[in-house]
Image: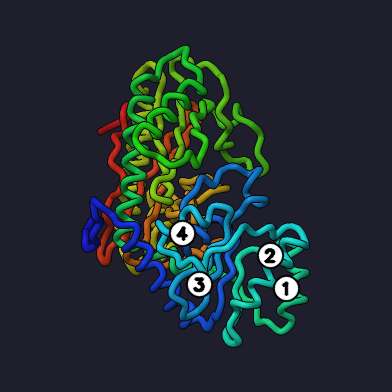
Amino acid sequence: MSATLTVPTDPSRVRMQRDRWAKLQATMAHQGVGTLVLLGNSNVSYATGASWPLADPGRANVDRPAAVVVAGDEAPHFFSALAGLVAEELAIPTDHVHGPVFAECDEGAEAFCRTLATLVPGEGRLAIDEFPGAMRRQFAEFFPDAKLAGSDEVVGTCKLIKTPDELGFMREALRITEEAIAPVQAALAPGMRQSDLTAVFLRGVFDHGAEANILDPIWQVMPKELADGPWTTHGDIACPLLTTERELEKGDVLWVDTGISYGGFSSDFGRTWVVGEEPSPQQHGQYRKWREIIDAVFAHVKAGATGTDLTRAALEVTGGHRPWMHHFYLCHGLGIESAESPFIGTDLGDAYDERQVLEEGMVVVFEPLVWEDGASGYRSEEVVAITKDGFIPLTDYPYDPYGD
C-alpha cells in the first residue's frame, strides 16, 4: 500500500469541472474529434457537472438531458428542462443553455439536429454515445457526410482517471454509505424483514446528505448449498436477488450490496453478515480464505499492473478456481456510475484482461468471494484508488462478525 495521490477533504465542484473540461478538450484534440453529442446520463453529467437522480427508468428517455461539446469551445451546450435553473451554478453561458431534447421522436430529433447543425464545426469527427432510431434517421438527413465515431474513446478515456476533487467526492459518498450502514447492521435480528433493513438504510443515507439511492439495497439470504439456490443458466450462484418482505431467521447469512450518489458520484458497499449468532468455524475459515485472496491481489495492485496480474494472483490462492461470480468480475471501476471501466475477470477472457492496465488515479472495487457448500459463502467489497506504486484504501468498514 502506498500513497502518492492527494484526496482533498473539501473537494470543489468548480475546480473539478474546470479540470474535466480541460481533459475533454485535450482528449478530443488527440482523437481528432470535433464534436461530442452526449445523450447518456452519466456522460452528460461528466461534461456539464450537472447532477440529478438517474434511477427513474420512466423518465430516463423522455426527459433526458443532453450535452454537446465542441472542440475549442469555452463550455458545453446543455439541453434540459432544468438547464436554466442550474446554468449559473454550473458556470455555463446563457447562449449555451437550451431546452429539453426529445430524441426518441422524429419531431424532437429533427429539432435537436437542426440546432446541432449550427454548432458542429466543419472539421473533425462527430462522436455520439447513444443513437435512438429517430436520431439516426435525422442524422442521415442533416449530416450525410459526417465521420461518426463512438464517444467512449473520448469520455470513457477521461472518466478512467479521477481528478483529486473527484476522489474527494467519491470518498465522501463512500463515507455516507458506511455511516448509514452501521445502524442497519446494529439492528439486524431474527424477525426483521429485508425491507425493514432497507428503510433504516435509506433514512440514514439521506440524513447524511446522499443525493439519490443508486442501487436498491440487497440483503440476500444465501442458501447453505448451491443446489438449494435458484437455477441459473451458468450453474453458478444466483446473485443479486431482489429484496422482499422476507423475515430473517437466526443463522441466515446475508450478502449485502448497495450504493448511493453524492456529488454526482456513486458509492459501492459489500459485506457478509450473519443474523443473530456468531459465524461457525467453517464460516470463519471462508473469511480467512477471502482475506488471503484479497491480500494476494492487493500485493500486485499498482499503476502498470494488468488485469491478468490480478486474476492470476487470485487463482494462485484457490488452485485455479475462479473466486468471483461468473456473471460478474473480480473487480470493476467506480465513478459517476456504480460500475464502469475497467472490468477485470469478465467472460471476455484473459486476452481482454491483459489489455486492462491500471493507472494512477483509477478507482477500483474488488469483490472476490469464497463459496463452500454447507456454509453459505463469504463476499466483501473493497474500494481503492490506484497510485504509482500501490493504492489508497477508500473503504473503512469492519468485517464483523467475521473479523476486524
- The CA span between labels 3 and 2 is 17 Å
Q: Specify the quadrant that holds the N terminus.
A: bottom left
Mark closer to the observer (4, 2): 4
Q: Which residue is mark 1?
A: 139
Secondary structure type for disc 3: helix
Of the two numbered discs 4 and 2 on the same chain, state the one appearing first in sequence: 4
Residue beneath the point at 34% across and 61% down: 14
Mark closer to the observer (1, 3): 1
User: Relative to the observer, which residue lies in front, 357 or 257?
Assistant: 257
Tell me: 173 left or right of 240: left
Neighbour tally class for label 1: few under 14, some 14-19, many 20 plus, Cα within 10 Å: many
Q: Are marks 1 and 2 in contact (CB under 8 Å)?
A: yes
- The CA span between labels 4 and 2 is 26 Å
Which amino acid lies under the numbered mark 3 shown in the image of this protein? Val
Q: Residue 171: image x %, image y %?
A: 31, 48
Of the two numbered discs 3 and 2 on the same chain, state the one appearing first in sequence: 2
Q: Are marks 1 and 3 in contact (CB under 8 Å)?
A: no
Q: Specify the quadrant that holds the C terminus.
A: top left
Neighbour tally class for label 3: few under 14, some 14-19, many 20 plus, Cα within 10 Å: many
Tell me: 342 left or right of 101: left
Secondary structure type for disc 2: loop
Mark closer to the observer (4, 3): 4
Q: Which residue is mark 4?
A: 87
Q: Which residue is mark 3?
A: 154
Residue beneath the point at 50% across and 42% down: 214
Residue beneath the point at 51% across and 40% down: 215
Of the two numbered discs 4 and 3 on the same chain, state the one appearing first in sequence: 4
